[in-house]
């Protein structure tokens, strides 16, 4: 990693816009920028105070490239912990490239993906989990994912892990000290207190591991498959949920022959709805392929909405029951929501009968919008929004999840060792491993390969 270089990159999205921001970081950032900047007040940039903004022109020799605002951040009071210069220029792609090429000729190199944040980590401005939260914050597209990313970037998760690691490290030090006095049979670490600590760490780790189920779906969106027989209103329901004509609707059975997907945010949580082909026996080759895709989407979905036509319920409700049981038996791990559509065309007596036969049924009319809110409220019940409201730590990163699982395994070994009254040297082995995995989360223990994999997923300029 060539961290001594001065790097440059466009920090705003590429393309035309009102303004663009070009960022430089490194030992030579201020010197290089100063050599290309002419202040309208005749100021020398490198002589100015940190956290100041200056109006002037970017010059390529005597050629004016643009009128700009230059923001100055001197180390260590900057995002990267190095000297940083940010140039706000006009958003023409031509101007952006002219300025970047000028700085490249003056001694900068193009930043690698995530290199500004990598330098922030290496210079102690962020730990590794906070750095990863920066990428999550940029990618957040709903209130819930934004809230989790903000909490992690501000160090909520890091502080919890660091506290556990520090307490465990203190006891580990005492046990290691016992090994130096093995012949004297001295016990420095109180085994009762140590057991209490191990049990508490186990509880916290299990809570964090369990939170990943919530965090993962909040971060990536919850896939919801809308399934049922042909012509029961699946496409109409999709359109009603999205409040737009996303899917073609007709009275002809088998209109939807492929899956249609779109996303929406409900209560701050992202959902990805999938309209599928109607499930029925058919000789139509194209429709058969669509039905096969329906079952594939059910496999991938976390929630399945089984939709049926309430107007046909009275004559054949045993068939509906058997179809529902088939879905439940085939996908026992899926969250299943039973929805009766077209209730605007049936009477109160049939509605009451529906509720008796299927107590958890949701009654709605996709055509009029009646009952849609009940469905969306029910969808939110699958998400632990209470944890969000209470600002509890929620794990969203699969790397953190894996490290927590491994840490828990080692902590459980320590507890088993205490139960069996194992010697300190054997306990110390498992404690070291637990400390190692906890340290991987925050970056107290890291490797170049690990850092390369993490920051390669960042955008250039961040």
Image (spheres, rainbow, N blue to C red):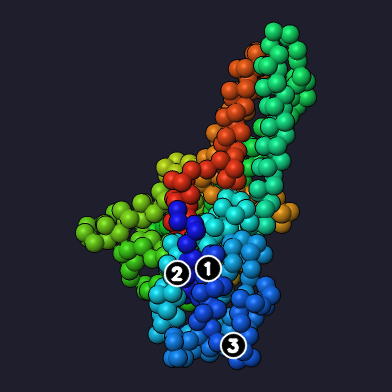
Q: Residues within 10 Å of mark 2 (few under 14, many from 20)?
A: many
Across and down, in percent, residue 188 comes to 76, 19
Q: Secondary structure at mark 2?
A: loop
Residue shown at 49% from the left, 89% from the top: 66
Q: Name which of mark 1 and mark 3 comes first in the sequence.
A: 1
- Horizontally, residue 8 falls left or right of residue 205, namely left
**Label 1 – label 3 distance at C-alpha:** 19 Å
Nearer to me, 192 or 56 = 56
Which of the labelled discs sits on residue 28, or is there none? 1
* Residue labelled with disc 3: 39
| Residue 450 visible, this angle | yes
Marks 2 and 3, how far apart in space? 21 Å
| Residues packed near mark 1 inside 10 Å, few (<14), some (14 to 19) or many (20 plus) | many
> Is 74 located above or below residue 385 in the figure?
below
Q: In the figure, 218 relative to 197: above or below?
A: below
Give the residue at x 38% y 66%.
260
Earlier residue among tags 2 and 1 = 1
Residue 417 pos. (x, y %): 63, 17
2 and 3 marks in contact (CB < 8 Å):
no
Q: Does residue 289 appear to the left or right of 421 in the view shown? A: left
Along the viewing direction, whichever of 342 and 312 lies nearer the viewer: 342
Residue at the disc numbered 2? 108
Q: CA distance from mark 2 to mark 1?
A: 8 Å
Give the percent coordinates (x, y) of residue 93: 41, 83
Contact between labelled residues 1 and 2, with CB atoms less than 8 Å apart: yes
**Mark sitting earlier along the chain (2/3):** 3
On the picture, is 330 further left or further right than 397?
left
Q: Residue 373 lies in what quarter of the image?
A: bottom right
């Amino acid at each position: 990693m060539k961290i001594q270089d001065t790097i440059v990159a466009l920090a705003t999205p590429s393309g035309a816009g009102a303004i663009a921001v070009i960022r430089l970081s490194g030992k030579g950032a201020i010197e290089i920028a100063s050599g290309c900047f002419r202040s309208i007040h005749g100021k020398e940039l490198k002589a100015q105070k940190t956290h100041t903004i200056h109006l002037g022109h970017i010059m390529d020799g005597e050629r004016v490239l643009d009128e700009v605002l230059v923001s100055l951040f001197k180390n260590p009071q900057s995002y990267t912990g190095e000297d940083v210069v940010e140039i706000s220029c006009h958003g023409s792609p031509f101007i952006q490239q002219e300025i970047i090429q000028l700085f490249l000729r003056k001694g900068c190199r193009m930043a690698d993906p995530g290199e500004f944040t990598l330098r922030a980590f290496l210079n102690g401005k962020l730990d590794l989990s906070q750095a990863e939260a920066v990428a999550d914050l940029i990618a957040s597209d709903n209130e819930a994912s934004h809230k989790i990313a903000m909490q992690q970037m501000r160090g909520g998760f890091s502080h919890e892990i660091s506290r556990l690691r520090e307490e465990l490290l203190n006891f580990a030090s005492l046990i290691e000290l016992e090994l130096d006095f093995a012949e004297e049979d001295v016990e420095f670490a109180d085994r009762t207190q140590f057991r209490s600590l191990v049990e508490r760490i186990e509880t916290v780790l299990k809570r964090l591991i369990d939170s990943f189920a919530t965090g993962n779906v909040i971060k990536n969106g919850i896939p919801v498959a809308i399934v049922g027989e042909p012509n029961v209103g699946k496409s109409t329901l999709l359109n009603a949920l999205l409040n737009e004509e996303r899917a073609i609707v007709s009275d002809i059975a088998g209109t939807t022959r492929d899956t249609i997907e779109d996303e929406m945010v409900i209560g701050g949580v992202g959902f990805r709805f999938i309209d599928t082909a109607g499930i029925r026996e058919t000789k139509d080759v194209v429709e058969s392929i669509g039905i096969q895709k329906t079952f594939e989407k059910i496999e991938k979905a976390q929630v399945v909405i089984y939709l049926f036509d309430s107007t046909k319920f009275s004559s054949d409700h045993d068939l509906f029951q058997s179809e529902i049981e088939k879905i439940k038996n085939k996908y026992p791990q899926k969250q299943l929501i039973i929805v009766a559509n077209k209730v605007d065309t049936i009477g109160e007596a049939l509605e009451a009968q529906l509720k008796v036969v299927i107590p958890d049924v949701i009654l709605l009319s996709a055509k009029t919008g009646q009952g849609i809110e009940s469905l969306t409220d029910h969808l939110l019940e699958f998400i632990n929004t209470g944890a969000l409201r209470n600002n509890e730590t929620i794990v969203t990163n699969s790397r953190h999840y894996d490290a927590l699982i491994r840490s828990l395994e080692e902590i459980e070994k320590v507890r088993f060792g205490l139960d069996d009254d194992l010697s300190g040297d054997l306990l110390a082995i498992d404690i070291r491993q637990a400390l190692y995995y906890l340290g991987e989360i925050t970056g107290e223990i890291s490797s170049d390969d690990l850092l390369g994999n993490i920051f390669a997923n960042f955008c250039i300029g961040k």
